């Protein structure tokens, strides 16, 4: 029986490389990951600049004035355009490949963002943070490998859409209530997880809407899906911008690239039946891989060098040159640079 299982996996693997949708969808998803990492870095820079100009932190939620100021920051606008390109690539990938395969590939953005942030902020990754990143990326890619073997697609029925929309409404209400009551005690991890959950629904609804428009089925329930998609994306975007003010960009990307696909995958498995063809042992692997990825996000939030250095005075080797730690807040800034000169 074990030999047969190995042969089945081999046949499935060959089938993956013969699927033109997957062969096009995966590169599109990877391109979206690159744009996502660049966009996150630019948006994070814009949020930091607005905080300095306004003289107040946005850790408990960005104010209307801070949101207005973001619209005038070139770095934030560039980051938003790049994230727009990431979304276009992601949606194109969703049209070509199953949701369970495309969504997790955004985890590659975490590696790129980590390297960029280490270079720009001067906070070199520590062993614990590197281990956490490996868990995030490794867990997600383990999931992708087996999801690509067994994921299937079928037409989403109205009843399934009602279930998704109802759950999304409950999620928005719960997250909104938590934000109103506890926002002064919330840290980046809450906003990252909240945004990841919402974006998981956004990805699912986007795929449904695109498929229905292609089939010429733009009826009233599709219009409701568009409204729900926009609402979830707006709340998720607000959470992301707030997370930038209370955490480094690679932590934000880590949460989004893990929580987002896990939620989308759960929806695909439980409601849409995309894992109906998966054997029981594959479901166990899905669960283990997801747990590893979530473990990585939680530990990255605890051990990220930038988070630690901003919360307490400890010696951390900073900068790409491995120079000594410093307690001077401006030490990480490039010599001769001026805050007002940054976009």
Image (cartoon, grey):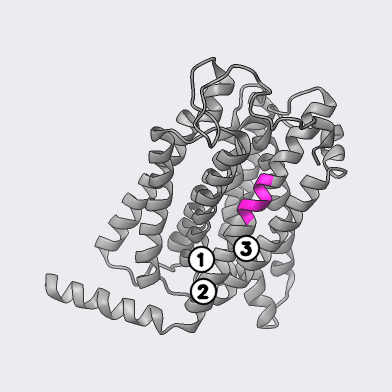
Tell me which label, 2 or 3, sits earlier in the chain.
2
Say few, some or many: other residues with alpha carbon within 10 Å of mark 1 (under 14 / 14 to 19 / 20 or more).
Answer: many
Numbered badge on residue 290: none
Q: Which residue is under mark 3? A: 205
Q: Provide residue 245's location: percent of width, then percent of height.
A: 68, 32
Seen in the picture, residue 206 relative to 71 is either above or below; the reply is below
Image quadrant of residue 269?
A: bottom left
Q: How far apart are the two marked residues, 1 and 3, measured between alpha carbons?
A: 14 Å
Range of magenta residues: 36-41
Q: Provide residue 44's location: percent of width, then percent of height.
A: 69, 40
Viewer-proximal residue among 161 and 20? 20
Image quadrant of residue 11?
A: bottom left
User: Do labels 2 and 3 touch, CB within 8 Å?
Assistant: no
Viewer-proximal residue among 270 and 77? 77
Tell me which label, 1 or 3, sits earlier in the chain.
1
User: Do labels 2 and 1 touch, CB within 8 Å?
Assistant: yes
Q: Provide residue 34's location: percent of width, then percent of height.
A: 59, 58
Does the magenta segment cover residue 93?
no
Numbered badge on residue 97: 2
Q: Which residue is under mark 1? A: 102
- For the C terminus, the image quarter is top right
Q: Provide residue 203's location: percent of width, then percent of height.
A: 60, 60
Residue 100 visible, this orientation: yes
Q: Is 1 displayed left or right of 183 in the figure?
A: left
């Amino acid at each position: 029986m074990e030999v047969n299982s190995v042969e089945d996996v081999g046949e499935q693997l060959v089938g993956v490389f013969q699927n033109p949708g997957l062969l096009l969808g995966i590169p599109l998803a990877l391109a979206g990951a690159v744009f996502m990492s660049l966009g996150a870095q630019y948006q994070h820079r814009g949020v930091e600049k607005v905080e300095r100009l306004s003289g107040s932190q946005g850790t408990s939620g960005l104010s209307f004035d801070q949101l207005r100021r973001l619209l005038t920051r070139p770095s934030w606008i560039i980051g938003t355009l790049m994230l727009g390109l990431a979304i276009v690539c992601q949606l194109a990938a969703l049209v070509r490949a199953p949701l369970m395969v495309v969504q997790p590939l955004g985890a590659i953005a975490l590696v790129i963002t980590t390297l960029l942030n280490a270079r720009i902020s001067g906070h070199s990754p520590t062993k614990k943070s590197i281990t956490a990143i490996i868990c995030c990326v490794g867990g997600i890619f383990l999931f992708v490998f087996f999801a690509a073997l067994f994921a299937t697609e079928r037409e989403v029925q109205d009843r399934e859409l009602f279930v998704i929309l109802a759950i999304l409404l409950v999620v928005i209400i719960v997250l909104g209530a938590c934000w109103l009551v506890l926002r002064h005690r919330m840290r980046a991890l809450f906003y990252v997880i909240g945004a990841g959950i919402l974006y998981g629904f956004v990805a699912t609804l986007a795929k449904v809407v695109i498929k229905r428009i292609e089939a010429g089925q733009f009826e009233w329930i599709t219009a409701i899906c568009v409204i729900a998609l926009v609402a979830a994306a707006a709340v998720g975007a607000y959470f992301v911008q707030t997370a930038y003010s209370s955490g480094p960009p690679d932590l934000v990307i880590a949460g989004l690239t893990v929580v987002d696909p896990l939620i989308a995958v759960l929806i695909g498995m439980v409601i849409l039946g995309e894992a109906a063809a998966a054997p029981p042992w594959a479901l166990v692997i899905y669960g283990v891989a997801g747990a590893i990825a979530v473990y990585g996000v939680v530990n990255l939030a605890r051990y990220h060098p930038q988070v630690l250095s901003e919360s307490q005075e400890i010696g951390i080797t900073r900068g790409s040159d491995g120079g000594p730690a410093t307690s001077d807040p401006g030490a990480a800034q490039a010599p001769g640079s001026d805050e007002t000169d940054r976009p």
